[in-house]
DNA sequence: ATCCAAGGGACTGTGATTCA
DNA sequence: TGAATCACAGTCCCTTGGAT
């Protein structure tokens, strides 16, 4: 009788009531409910999940399984190991122990077809004696999972540390084939679109094509064909059939790229979508800069002088990190270990890089909370909310100890007070539990990928928030995609029409040159708000105001369409 | 002055798809 | 067949700003 009422929706809700936020854990509950009578403890050799009879909000899900499923483990292994190495080299005691726990986890039975058993490594934080080790897990929210999945097989490009349990029985689903066709048309298009396409750039592309062509094989499976994004084929049809498979780039071919001083292969979701070209980015930046002039509100976020964060990055880069150098890092003096120690050990309120620049007085927590408060509201309101919060609670310890209702009241002017207060308190609580202090300065020594992984754990911190923290507050080369950037990028044809925001983010971060990311983001946001033609809310379009991007769009699209046989055949 | 649709980012629900 | 995955639409809740 009860079973009849258990629609997927109800099951989903039950899963939530039963505590685990994890989508996967809820799925396990659903599976249990589906597969057996309620109230009976279920155990399988593989799952180790049980639901008590009375539906008490307790559920046990094997942690290692969750880590196994959702972590881009290999990346984390690499970055954590690197971090430990950096600390060792700089004379610091690493607070992380890397432990391979392959023995703890049996390989999953091959169920379904999607999940290739991945190597499993857990990171056990060193705890004082007598305490149980703290296992760092990862959020399993849908948005985060999607973000991770839309990233291509990045770590397969490089030879990752040989981790345990490699089962190479079948290729990953994401390994797509490569088919190179109509290359001459691609070149023609490139020539048409960009008259100023330099010979060097052409050489780079030709080499890239050659390398990928060599390392890849043709596939005729339906699945692989489907992997070709149809929209991409419309907007960039001349090269639409080129699918670069990063997994097929051999170390040798990669080395040849490096030796030619060429960049690494594209690792975004739309390998066939070659737009935007660097010259295109530059041209659009110039157009918008001419239109909107200087944007003083963003200038404080632009790095102006060497800081500890850039210095920390230098250490990483010297150690071989794959993180991108931040703007200005080249001029920064190399730091010494004492700097790093100071950053790690200083209470968050006291972490001030004495450069005199107001921006650097913000701690990472400040930045994160500030960005969180800026969600779903205007800049003005979020600024007021942050100022109000800091006025009432000068330190984050006070926020943590405060009555949640007081915190809500202090940020009420920013909107969504209850939600945001809950998220802020959750972050602070988690931080304090894990690290014993309210300090996130350790992020400054991490690579971009590590920071993304670290921040995405927190509820309410999505890709855009993370990217904003990275770009505005950590001065990394990131290109956050908000609603304005998303809209304008699509209008410019920089991403396929079918792209969602997260794929747009991944694609543009690959395509836009690092040195243009900051400018373009700021200009897109400003333009998206101000331009009556490009603003989302389009009511009356003044005839006397022209949008420079409109001309740009028509010019580029004409060139594209002229060389597009699909479009001329009317098969759009 | 009031109404109301749009905007904002993170997250969830659900049907479709894939494939061993 | 069923577990896993994907993609898309919808929800949340408040502010903003155009229309009446």
Image: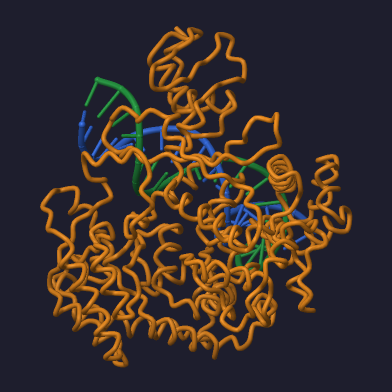
Chain colours: A orange, B blue, C green
Name the residue located 59 percent from the left edge and 65 percent from the top edge: A470
Q: Residue A244 location, x and y as percent? A: 24, 63
Q: Classify residue A397 as left or right of residue A147.
A: right
Q: Is residue A378 above or below residue A522?
A: above
Q: Is residue A557 left or right of residue A434?
A: left
Count numbered badges in the picture. 0
Image coords of residue A268 (percent x, y):
36, 62
Q: Is residue A531 visible?
A: no
> Vertically, is A36 above or below A341?
above
Question: Toward the viewer: A135 or A489?
Answer: A135
Q: Quadrant of residue A531?
A: bottom right
Left or right: A384, with A532 as reference point: right
Residue A370 x/y as whole percent: 71, 60
Look at 60% across and 20% down and name the residue there: A58
- Where is A570 relative to A433, above or below? below
Q: Nearer the viewer, residue A540 or A419?
A: A419
């Amino acid at each position: 009788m009860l079973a009849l009422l258990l629609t997927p929706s109800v099951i989903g809700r039950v899963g939530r009531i039963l505590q685990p936020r994890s989508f996967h854990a809820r799925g396990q509950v659903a599976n249990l409910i589906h597969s057996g009578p309620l109230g009976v403890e279920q155990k399988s050799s593989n799952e180790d999940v049980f639901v008590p009879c009375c539906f008490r909000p307790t559920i046990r899900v094997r942690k290692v399984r969750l880590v196994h499923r959702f972590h881009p483990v290999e990346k984390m292994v690499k970055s954590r190991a690197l971090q430990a190495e950096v600390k060792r080299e700089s004379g610091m005691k690493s607070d992380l122990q890397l432990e391979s726990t392959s023995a703890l986890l049996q390989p999953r039975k091959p169920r379904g077809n999607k999940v290739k058993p991945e190597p499993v490594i857990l990171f056990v934080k060193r705890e004082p004696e007598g305490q149980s080790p703290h296992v760092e897990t990862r959020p399993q929210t849908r948005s985060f999972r999607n973000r991770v999945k839309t990233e291509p097989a990045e770590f397969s490009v490089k030879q990752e540390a040989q981790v345990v349990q490699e089962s190479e029985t079948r290729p990953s689903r994401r390994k797509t084939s490569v088919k190179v066709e109509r290359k001459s048309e691609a070149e023609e298009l490139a020539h048409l679109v960009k008259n100023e396409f330099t010979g060097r750039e052409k050489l780079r592309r030709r080499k890239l094509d050659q390398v990928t062509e060599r390392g890849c094989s043709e596939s005729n499976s339906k699945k692989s064909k489907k992997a070709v994004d149809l929209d991409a084929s419309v907007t960039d049809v001349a090269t639409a059939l080129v699918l670069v498979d990063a997994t097929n780039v051999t170390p040798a071919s990669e080395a040849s790229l490096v030796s030619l001083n060429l960049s690494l292969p594209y690792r975004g979701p739309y390998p066939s979508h070659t737009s935007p070209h660097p010259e295109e980015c530059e041209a659009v930046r110039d157009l918008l800069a001419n239109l909107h002039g200087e944007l003083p509100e963003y200038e404080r976020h632009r790095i102006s002088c060497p800081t500890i964060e850039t210095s920390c990055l230098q250490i990483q880069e010297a150690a071989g990190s794959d993180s991108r150098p931040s703007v200005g890092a080249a001029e920064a003096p190399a730091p010494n270990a004492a700097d790093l120690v100071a950053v790690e050990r200083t209470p968050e309120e006291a972490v001030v890089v004495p450069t005199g620049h107001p921006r650097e007085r913000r701690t990472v927590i400040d930045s994160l909370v500030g960005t969180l408060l800026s969600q779903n509201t205007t800049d003005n309101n979020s600024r007021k909310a942050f100022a109000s919060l800091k006025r009432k609670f000068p330190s984050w310890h006070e926020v943590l100890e405060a009555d949640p209702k007081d915190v809500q009241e202090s940020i009420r002017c920013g909107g969504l007070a209850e939600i945001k207060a809950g998220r802020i308190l959750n972050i602070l609580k988690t931080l304090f539990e894990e690290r014993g202090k309210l300090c996130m300065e350790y992020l400054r020594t991490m690579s971009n990928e590590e920071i993304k992984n670290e921040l995405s754990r927190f509820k309410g911190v999505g890709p855009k928030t993370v990217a904003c923290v990275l770009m505005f507050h950590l001065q990394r080369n990131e290109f956050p995609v908000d609603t304005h950037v998303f809209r304008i990028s699509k209008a410019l044809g920089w991403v396929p029409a079918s792209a969602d925001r997260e794929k747009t983010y991944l694609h543009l971060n690959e395509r836009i040159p690092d040195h243009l990311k900051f400018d373009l983001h700021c200009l897109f946001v400003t333009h998206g708000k101000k331009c009556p033609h490009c603003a989302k809310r389009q009511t009356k379009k003044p005839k006397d105001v022209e949008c420079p991007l409109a001309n740009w769009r028509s010019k580029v699209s004409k060139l594209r369409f002229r060389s597009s046989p699909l479009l001329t055949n009317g098969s759009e």
